[in-house]
């Protein structure tokens, strides 16, 4: 095994560069994963822009697909050579949060203390996955074997955007026959659309303006696509629902405008399921909130992780219930990671997700 590896490193706001770092050392509860495919997330762009703070010199990335290179002395049932994934959120399995069922908030203690979003460790509180190797902490809780016959690109969405998008539909408690609006059809919004269909929603309204994303929304299960550049999305949603509003609205962009529109699209007693990463304060308009008397629910979700969540998501793919491979629109080698960031950060060429292969 080499002593050094290539890795995408955060230098300062506006600069993530390919650099050389030591191959991670592992402890008794860890595994070393040789990355075969990873990707860039919208959250990585927040890091790049300085909107979400991380330590200088941190390896970025939180969506690993790879092969086990080595396991710690306490890790039983796994062996080198196995193809596995690990969720973007890596619960310890033993903390108060995890034992309370809040696995996404369970990251144990890190150098920052118990940092909010504690379960998000890769590329946040420890070195991440845009590298040739990554240390997977608490491997027994997090490594999920990839079923034979599934390619890297088929399972690439499981660690983060599939889990996050589906969580938006799950947190909204969608029921068979529900009407739901999904605001923004980026990768997470598209997964929320697919998740809403799997949960039984029968009238799914996607809100988007980019032509490639509008088309993909229909492929993922949307029944209507509302182009917010052409019409007022709230007015159009009320027209489609004959004035009733939607049972649930899923906000998948992280802007004041989309949050407010999602709230205004709800029926009385409806649920706003928020997935966006917000970089500023949110305001709740008094009229849209019915002065707090509308029986509304506002719920948030952080990407569920852990090996059981990953196993279930791969079951969905293996069972042909959803095909997220078309979301991979561009492919780069790790050596081209800076070019990939430039493309993805500026949303050129109809990009949805990029596959990065060391």
Image (cartoon, rainbow, N blue to C red):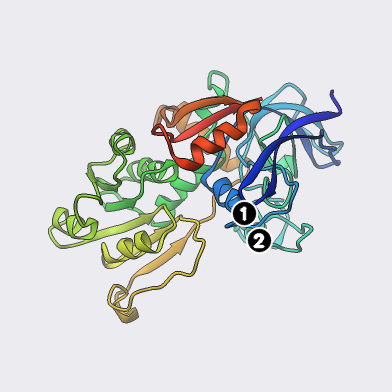
**Label 1 residue SS:** helix
User: Residue 76, labelled with which disc?
Assistant: none
Q: Is residue 290 above or below residue 170?
A: below
Position in image of residue 267 (x %, y %) = 24, 65
Residue at the spot 20% in from the left edge and 50% down from the top edge: 230
- Asked whether 235 or 292 is in front, the reply is 235
Q: Which residue is mark 2?
A: 97
User: Where, quadrant-wise, is the N terminus in this rendering?
Assistant: top right
Residue at the spot 75% in from the left edge and 44% down from the top edge: 137
Q: Earlier in the sequence, mark 1 or mark 2?
A: 2
Residue 79's quadrant in the figure? top right
Q: Is residue 249 above or below residue 200?
A: below
Residue at the spot 50% in from the left edge and 56% down from the top edge: 277
The answer to whether residue 146 is visible is no
Residue sitting at the far top: 149
How busy is the neighbourhood of tag 2: few (under 14 within 10 Å), some, or many (20 plus)? some
Position in image of residue 355 (x %, y %) = 54, 28
Residue at the spot 55% in from the left edge and 52% down from the top edge: 46
Residue 30's quadrant in the figure? top right
Q: Is residue 244 left or right of residue 156?
A: left
User: Residue 103, labelled with which disc?
Assistant: 1
User: Mark 2 and mark 1 in contact (Cβ < 8 Å)?
Assistant: yes
**Label 2 residue SS:** helix
CA distance for labels 1 and 2: 6 Å
Position in image of residue 219 (x %, y %) = 31, 33
Q: Is residue 201 above or below residue 295?
A: above
User: Where, quadrant-wise, is the C terminus in this rendering?
Assistant: top right
The answer to whether residue 69 is visible is yes
């Amino acid at each position: 095994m080499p002593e050094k590896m290539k890795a995408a490193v955060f230098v300062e706001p506006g600069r993530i560069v390919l650099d050389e770092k030591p191959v991670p050392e592992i402890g008794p509860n860890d595994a070393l994963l040789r990355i075969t495919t990873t990707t860039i997330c919208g959250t990585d762009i927040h890091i790049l822009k300085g909107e979400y703070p991380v330590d200088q010199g941190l390896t970025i990335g939180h969506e690993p697909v790879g092969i086990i290179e080595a396991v710690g002395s306490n890790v039983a049932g796994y062996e080198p050579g196995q193809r596995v994934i690990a969720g973007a959120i890596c619960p310890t399995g033993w903390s108060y949060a995890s034992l309370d069922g809040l696995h996404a908030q369970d990251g144990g203690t890190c150098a920052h203390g118990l940092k909010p979003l504690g379960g998000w460790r890769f590329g946040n509180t420890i070195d991440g996955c845009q590298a040739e190797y990554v240390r997977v902490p608490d491997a027994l809780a997090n490594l999920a074997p990839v079923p034979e016959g599934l390619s890297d690109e088929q399972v690439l969405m499981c660690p983060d955007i599939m889990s996050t998008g589906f969580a938006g539909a799950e947190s909204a408690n969608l029921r068979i026959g529900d009407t739901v609006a999904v605001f923004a059809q980026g990768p997470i919004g598209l997964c929320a659309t697919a998740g809403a269909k799997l949960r039984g929603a029968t009238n799914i309204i996607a809100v988007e303006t980019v032509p490639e994303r509008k088309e993909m929304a229909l492929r993922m299960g949307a029944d209507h696509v509302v182009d917010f550049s052409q019409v007022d999305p709230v007015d159009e949603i009320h027209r489609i629902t004959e004035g009733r509003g939607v049972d649930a609205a899923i906000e998948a962009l992280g802007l004041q405008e989309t949050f407010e529109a999602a709230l205004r699209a709800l029926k009385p007693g409806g649920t706003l399921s928020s997935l966006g990463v917000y970089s500023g304060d949110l305001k709740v308009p008094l009229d849209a909130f019915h002065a707090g008397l509308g029986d509304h629910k506002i719920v948030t979700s952080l990407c569920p992780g852990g090996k059981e969540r990953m196993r279930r998501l791969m079951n969905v793919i293996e069972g042909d219930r959803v095909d997220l491979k078309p979301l991979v629109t561009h492919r780069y080698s790790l050596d081209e990671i800076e070019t990939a960031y430039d493309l993805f950060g500026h949303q050129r060429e109809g990009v949805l997700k990029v596959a990065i292969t060391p």
